[in-house]
Image: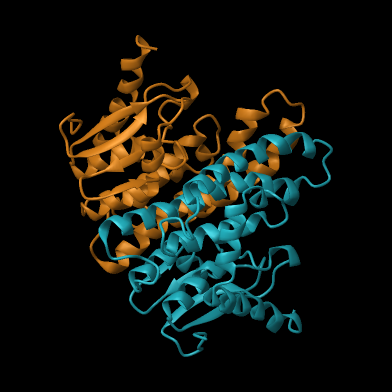
Chain colours: A cyan, B orange
């Protein structure tokens, strides 16, 4: 397992989050990418809702996690960091220009075309759980999610991964689909549900998830 | 002006959209990037809400625009394409690794951290304009937008661009901030409003916008 306090590559994560957020914080795809690439890393935990120091904000201007530093560059945004890890490992980002271009397209698509449609639905639960109009808003928002999931499922077809071989695009797409775990929307497409399960079954994902959750356990007594 | 029907680099755009969407369709940042880079391109227009052929979906799996082909690679997702154009031109993506890493971080941040918070607010107008609870939902959604704009404004400070020199990160951030044009949210930060105006004043942006809008004019008589 590449978690190593002395590693040159360092990321930030959260030391505590509400139960519903565990397994969904954005250090997870970065840990997963580092595990796929076999790159040792260390994680420094920040509080969920705490003040951020000037240094923290210089590293991550939104006061969120993860931030990343590998001794050469400092970055923020999970998509950007996963791409950087891909530049360090062919396991995530093919070197063939055409395959590389498709991988980067899917990496952005997972965040910008798919997660963008999931987020408004998540907000219904986060902000408006007690509003009587919540169920009036849901169908249109679910419709947006269904539309993009249908497109992803159609492209996936009978393949194991979006472009045949596993890439950083699949890593991010699986990460985003996990945000729908409290809904039945992914299960509406058998091939997409199998794709999600296939991603979560990867040993690198399992190691990343264990490390992600371990940080919360560490802090449970300190909190 | 690099629009050239014989150009090797080809993109797709929309031939018609409702008035409110003009100037916001995602071919615009791609055109802008190509203009900054001085790369000639041609644009093929698709209908706003039409069937997509199997070829169209192979090129753009979500049935949206833009798709991009430069003779070497085929891509989709405006963020991915802008990054590709950056790889072709130092005008958008610095060659220094540290500056390059920050540029890519901001490119993702514009879409994933900033636009992700704007989209739910846009949906209030798109889907729920006639709902009495629209104004009950607005403050929480505006709060999310205000939070991220505050972070961007704080990072920008007195600089002209997010990391000093104009990059692909600024190009996408300005594109995203334009989505708030019907609100007063950007104007709450004088430096952010000036930044947006500075981006829109760039000759390359003006050429891209003119070409983007010209496609709608072309189709007005054919529609």
**Which residue is painted at 37% across and 23% down in the image?**
B15
Residue at the bottom extreme?
A: A6
Residue B102 vertical placement versus B89 (above, below):
below
Q: Is residue B25 above or below residue A62?
A: above
Q: Is residue B166 above or below residue B136?
A: below
Residue A9, image x, y percentages: 43, 80
The image position of residue A62, as x and y in percent, is 53, 59
Q: Nearer the viewer, residue B144 or B71?
A: B71
Q: Is residue B160 visible?
A: no
Left or right side of A102 for B119: right
Residue positioned 67% across, 34% down in the render: A140
Which residue occupies the foreground of this view, A167 or B3?
A167
Q: Residue furthest front?
A: A158
Q: Locate the C terminus of chain A by quadrant.
A: bottom right
**Coordinates of residue B177 in the picture (x, y in percent):** 46, 40
**Could you say which quadrant of the image residue A182 lies in?**
bottom right
Q: Position of residue B123 (x, y in %)?
A: 61, 34
* Residue placed most toward the observer, A211 or B19: A211
- A197 left or right of B10 in image: right
**Looking at the image, which residue is at 21% across and 54% down?**
B90
Q: Residue at x 26, y 50 (%)?
A: B73
Instruction: Mark yes or no: residue A17 visible.
Output: yes
Left or right of B137: which side holds B105?
left
Q: Nearer the viewer, residue A18 or A158?
A: A158
């Amino acid at each position: 397992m590449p978690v190593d306090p002395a590693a040159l590559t360092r990321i930030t994560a959260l030391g505590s989050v509400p139960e519903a957020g565990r397994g969904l914080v954005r250090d997870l795809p970065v840990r997963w990418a580092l595990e796929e690439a076999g790159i040792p890393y260390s994680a420094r935990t920040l509080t969920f809702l705490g003040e951020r120091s000037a240094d923290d904000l210089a590293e991550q201007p939104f006061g969120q996690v993860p931030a990343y530093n590998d001794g050469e560059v400092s970055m923020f945004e999970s998509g950007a960091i996963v791409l950087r890890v891909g530049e360090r490992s062919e396991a995530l980002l093919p070197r063939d220009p055409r395959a590389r271009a498709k991988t980067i397209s899917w990496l952005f698509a997972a965040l910008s075309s798919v997660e963008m449609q999931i987020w408004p639905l998540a907000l219904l639960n986060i902000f408006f759980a007690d509003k009587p109009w919540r169920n009036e808003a849901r169908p249109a928002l679910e419709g947006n999610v269904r539309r993009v999931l249908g497109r992803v499922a159609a492209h996936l077809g009978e393949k194991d991964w979006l472009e045949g071989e596993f890439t950083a695009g699949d890593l991010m797409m699986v990460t985003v689909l996990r945000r729908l775990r409290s809904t039945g929307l992914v299960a509406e497409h058998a091939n997409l549900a199998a794709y999600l399960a296939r991603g979560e079954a990867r040993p690198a994902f399992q190691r990343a998830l264990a490390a992600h959750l371990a940080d919360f356990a560490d802090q449970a007594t300190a909190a």
